[in-house]
Image: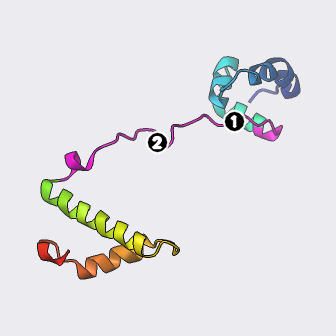
Amino acid sequence: MQNRNWPAIIETQIKPLLTVPGITRREIAERLGLPYRQVNNMLLYYGIKIPRAKIKKGIRRGYIPCPMETALTVEQCDHMRRFLACLAAYADMCPTKKLDVSAFMSEYRKNCIWGKEDLL
């Protein structure tokens, strides 16, 4: 790694880039022609904060939404809808208590036998 005069680089090259709305650390590194890690570490060392890139709520990188109807068979969809209906009913019974989904799932597995339509 070359010795660089980081304070001078910050003043002359990085500070003007910080006025660009929505610029990320990666874009700064590309514009300076430096490796991302080097620029990131330098910004962290000097305490320069750059807001993280905005990611749409609920959408992660590589996430492809898939409706339940396309991922499951018709029978599995019916079981899933029944489970979700029971979970919603359980949540409505105790609105003041925090909903414990894992405890509900274990009880649901014990008491619900798949294939028996008359249970619910």
The percent position of residue 11, horizontal first and vertical second, equals: 86, 22
Camera sees residue 116: no
| Residue drawn at the location 76% of the way across and 37% of the way down | 49
Front residue (pair 98, 36) = 98
The image quadrant of residue 28 is: top right
Secondary structure beneath dot 2 equals loop
Is residue 66 one of those drawn in magenta?
yes
Circle 1 crowding by C-alpha within 10 Å: few under 14, some 14–19, many from 20: few
Classify residue 83 by image quadrant.
Answer: bottom left
Left or right relative to 115: residue 99 = right
Residue 37 in the image: above or below residue 79: above
For disc 2, the marked residue is: 60
Task: Work out which quarter of the rendered image holds the C terminus and state it.
Answer: bottom left
Which region is colored magenta? Answer: 44-72
Up-down: is 5 above or below 120?
above
The N terminus appears in which quarter of the rendering? Answer: top right
- Three-letter residue code for mark 2: Arg
Relative to 118, say whether 44 is above or below. Answer: above
Dot 1: element: loop
- From the viewer's perspective, tell me whether residue 73 is left or right of residue 10: left
Q: Position of residue 111 (x, y in %)?
A: 25, 82
The dot on residue 51 is 1
At 37% from the left and 73% from the top, the residue drawn is 90
